[in-house]
Amino acid sequence: MTRKFYLLAACVLAWISPAAYAELRIEINQGVERPVPIAVVPFGWKGSSGSAPFDVGALIAADLAGSGRFAPMSRGDMLQKPTRGRDIDFGDWRILGTEVIIVGQLIPTGADRYSIQFQVFDVFRGDLLLGYRLPTDRASLRMRTRRAADMIYEKLTGIPGAFSTRIAYVSVVRTGGKPTYRLIVQDADGANEQRMLRSSDPIMSPVWSPDGRKLAYVSFESDQSEIYIQTLRSGARQRVSARAGVNGAPAWSPDGRKLALTLSKSDGNLDIYTLDLATQVLRRLTDLSSIDTEPVWSPDGRTIYFTSDRAGGPQIYRVSSGGGRAKRVTFEGNYNARPRISPDGKQLAVVHNDRGSYKIALVDMARSYVQVLTKGPLDESPSFAPNGETLIYAAQAGNQGVLAMTSTDGRIHRRISSVEGDVREPAWSPYPVN
Amino acid sequence: MKLSKLLMIILLLGLVAACKGPGGTVVDDGMQDSSVAPGDSGGAVSSGVGSGTMGEGSEFTEDMGQHADADMMDNRVVYFEFDKSEVTGAYADMLAVHAGHLMSNPAMRVRLEGHTDEQGSREYNIGLGERRAQAVKRVLMLQGVGADQISTVSYGEERPAALGSDEEAWSLNRRVELVPDM
């Protein structure tokens, strides 16, 4: 059962913000067995003249469709186009088999001020499920519309939506054999690209600060690995680690004050350290001749999970973030690496080798149980959506690096294809801080 | 097989070397490239092929040993098995020639660039590439090369010598390159 939806919302928006253009395209390979039939009626425009500056309804419909859980009706099939609850004839929508109807209006409220007003109804009962008014300015119309989609999604599924979040990733375009690496940030629905950095040398391992305002990453621009922190809004960046040897795998502590990172120093042996960003105090957490790398903090900041090959092949271990003895976490399979922890702290997403194929798997930490979610053969770099419902990861399709998403229950699979070059190392942002 | 592999490496190295032009690293500020970051000294892989011994081959007086050494000096890549970092005996002669060359030229330095294939996670592969570079460093030091003449860097799977997702490409990518460090 293949269901395809191309989210070309960015095209709709091109005239709102000329800087926005889509480089990624989301395709649903497998949605839920029976996506909920919904109708997102075109929003009314209450301006005294002209047409609406933004198609709110189209973006809400596209976001809900992109989740794989909903099947929005096409506008051409709608018998009526109400923009307020009192104008809905629920009988007509019941005949069409619609279960949920969303109506709304975009209302100008002042100079560069608007109000997005929307209502969500259960068609069978005629009940109002959610009614809301979101104030916004013109520049934030798109962002606020995604926020509305988040709220609707939560009302309908019980899971907070993540449409208003963003994805950072690395792209590589080869021109005549010469690679250009880019660090890119994009809306989670694949639009609104923002290029952060361009380099002729590799860029690796982007991670978000807990407040979503900065990225830490590895750059080889000085012919060795170095860790940088870059602020999204200003583009300003700061080099935070350029010690001899490997400087890699940055991971932000939940309070944003420290980085866990991997250093080899001069002896060439990779170990995990924490670096206090304000005081520059470095603390060593592992001290073995094995490769110890890919740290990630637990949500409470007390534990650091990491990859180590101290027992032969790479496996996941944990250690107190204050130091101490490390304990092994994964035992199933001969290759488990690059852990990312679920927002509730109960599961790890890892790269798991299953009979020669690299797949994304979930490790339930209470039961040490491993659930393989993807098909491989070269899947890597899983990253949780902040609602814990979805993982984005890197895969290969026909010798091209692509991004893909899977729901953590394995029911929904989406592929995000790049228009140009290889894309890799996706990192899902936290919820935006307002 | 061996020769074609070598040829491929030479071609690829040549390509990479040729490519490393202005390039550099630039902060993208929305649409426009704004401030230029510090850094790029213009040579992540400044590895050329050959090393100055190429032109000396025509003299009749040179003995066979020197010819062999010149060939060995052109050979600058050590390959590894999957997930392994042991330098096999096949590279003993080649590394001995490099070690000898470094010892008789104390001002010379070599940069050991460790690489892996694309399988598995990227940062773990940085560790594996570093371990491979360190393994070659140990071999050179055992021959008597000073530690101050050797530097290492790991690119993991980030700079493949061969593109492609099959064993042939992977075997060419699991390597350490000996790069003259000027």
Image (cartoon, coloured by chain):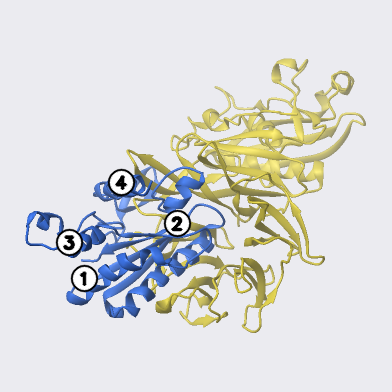
Chain colours: A yellow, B blue
Q: Chain of mark 2?
A: B
Going by the numbered disc 1, the residue's amino acid type is His
Q: Nearer the viewer, mark 2 or mark 4?
A: 4
Image location of residue A217, percent across then percent down = 47, 60
Residue A288, relative to residue A357: is it above or below? Answer: below
Left or right of A355: which side holds B78?
left
- Which residue is disc 4 drawn over? B7
B62, B145: nearer the viewer? B62
Kindly check if marks 1 and 4 are in contact, taking CB atoms under 8 A apart as contact. no
Residue drawn 50% across the image and 61% down it: B125
Spatial CA span between label 1 and label 2: 25 Å
Q: Residues within 10 Å of mark 4 (few under 14, many from 20)?
A: few
Q: Residue furthest bottom?
A: A324
Res B101 label: 1
Residues at badges 1 and 2 in contact (C-beta under 8 Å)?
no
Between marks 4 and 3, how big is the CA–CA gap? 22 Å
Q: Position of residue B138 (x, y in %)?
A: 38, 76
Instruction: Using the numbered discs, state the Cα–Cα distance from disc 2 to disc 4 in whole angstroms.
Output: 17 Å
Q: Which residue is mark 2?
A: B174
Measuring from the top left, give residue A314's x and y in whole percent. 61, 66
- Discs 3 and 1 carry the same chain letter: yes
Task: List the residue tagged with mark 3.
Answer: B64
Mark earlier in primary sequence (1, 4): 4
Asked where in the image residue A245 lies, by quadrant, the reply is: bottom left
